[in-house]
Image (cartoon, rainbow, N blue to C red):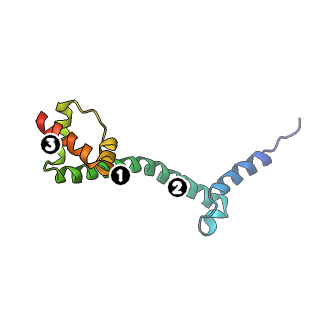
Amino acid sequence: MARIKGAMMTRKRRNKTLKLAKGYWGSKSKLFKMAKQAVMKSGNYAYIGRKQKKREVRQLWITRISAACQMNGINYSQFMNGCKKAGITLNRKMLSEIAIHDAAGFSAIVEQAKAAL
């Protein structure tokens, strides 16, 4: 029986990794062993980054809401507590957008939240 060699699949696998490492500095983009390590590490960074992005965006929304609340004479935690008690179910993203684009509308929401406290 003839011996089957894996040359084609090995080359395909290596080229796939080298393609992912394209643009990396020095031997990280040329040599398979170095490229494999760099791609693994960058994949971990990308995974972590996707989680951090969600945190950072939520933090931005909260900062924007907090700034708008200060203008209306209430702090963020009291405002959120008032919203919960008043039955306002808008999420932080929408509250942030309203605070930026519709100051009068946000003021009305703040008044409802104050009344519920």
User: Mark 3 highlights which residue?
Assistant: 78
Circles 1 and 3, Cβ within 8 Å, touching? The answer is no
Answer left or right for 14 relative to 107: right
Three-letter residue code for mark 2: Ser
| Closer to the eye: label 1 or 3 | 3
| Closer to the eye: label 2 or 3 | 3
The first of marks 2 and 3 along the sequence is 2
Three-letter residue code for mark 1: Glu
The first of marks 2 and 1 along the sequence is 2
Answer left or right for 64 relative to 13: left
Question: Which residue is drawn at the image coordinates 47% and 48% (left, top)?
Answer: 47
**Residue 5 at what x, y percent from top left?**
81, 44
Disc 3 crowd, CA 10 A, few/some/many (<14, 14-19, 20+): some
Disc 2 crowd, CA 10 A, few/some/many (<14, 14-19, 20+): some
State which quadrant residue 116 falls in: top left
**Residue 31 at what x, y percent from top left?**
66, 62
User: Mark 1 highlights which residue?
Assistant: 56
| Closer to the eye: label 2 or 1 | 1
Question: Which residue is drawn at the image coordinates 41% and 47% (left, top)?
Answer: 51
Three-letter residue code for mark 3: Gln
Whole-number angstrom distance, CA of label 2 to CA of label 1: 20 Å
User: Mark 2 highlights which residue?
Assistant: 42
Whole-number angstrom distance, CA of label 2 to CA of label 3: 42 Å
Q: Quadrant of the C terminus?
A: top left
Whole-number angstrom distance, CA of label 1 to CA of label 3: 22 Å
Determine the secondary structure under disc 3: helix
